Amino acid sequence: MVHGQKLIVITPSQQTKSLAKDILSFFKKYEPKSSVTIGISNHIKDPGDYTNGYTEAKKAAEFADLFGKSNDFGIIGVLFQAHHLNSMRAFRNKYIEALVNYDSNQKADLLESLKVFLDHESGI
């Protein structure tokens, strides 16, 4: 379905990456001057979650436009995959644990600052 300048595609999750590559190849070949960004949501199991999937894919495309075309958006990418336990563990081990240790050693309050930042939708 085409929505404005957005092409919305619903596909089985096992075909998502190959379809995304095919779409990018198509635009490279037939519209080489156009800019194409693809946002992909996590797997949707329940039809009632399609709206959330659309929003997630839209945000992923927005992040790709802002931070560069990449499969890895670092902390932001991990936060968007909060329901994936392994991603959250890796995030905790790499970032949160370091904040806890720093706060403890320096009597700082960085973890609380992060909480407030996230509670306010990352707005400064």
Image (tube, rainbow, N blue to C red):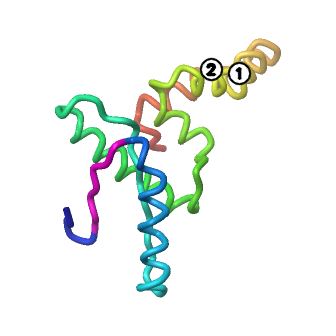
Tag 1 secondary structure: helix
Q: Is residue 24 left or right of residue 46?
A: right
Residue 116: x and y in percent read 49, 27
9 within the magenta span: yes
Q: Is residue 89 left or right of residue 79?
A: right
What label sits on residue 93 in the rendered view?
A: 1
Q: Residue at x 41, y 34 (%)?
A: 120
- Distance from disc 2 to disc 1, alpha carbons, whole Å, reads 6 Å
> Quick check: 80 above or below 23?
above
Q: Residue at x 18, y 34 (%)?
A: 47
> Quick check: 42 above or below 82?
below
Magenta stretch bounds: 6-12
Q: Callout 1: 10 Å neighbours few (<14), some, many (20+)?
A: few
Q: Are marks 2 and 1 in contact (CB under 8 Å)?
A: yes
Viewer-closest of 96 and 117:
96
Q: Based on the displayed image, in which of its 4 quarters is residue 101 positioned?
A: top right
Q: Based on the displayed image, in which of its 4 quarters is residue 38 positioned?
A: bottom left
Q: Is residue 72 left or right of residue 81?
A: right
Viewer-closest of 100 and 112:
100
Residue 64: x and y in percent read 50, 58
Q: Residue at x 64, y 27 (%)?
A: 91
- Three-letter residue code for mark 1: Asn
Q: Quadrant of the N terminus?
A: bottom left
Q: Callout 2: 10 Å neighbours few (<14), some, many (20+)?
A: some
Residue bearing the label numbered 2: 89
Q: Residue at x 43, y 77 (%)?
A: 27
Residue that extends furthest to the right in the rendered view of this protein: 105
Residue 65: x and y in percent read 49, 63
- Three-letter residue code for mark 2: Arg
What label sits on residue 5 in the rendered view?
A: none
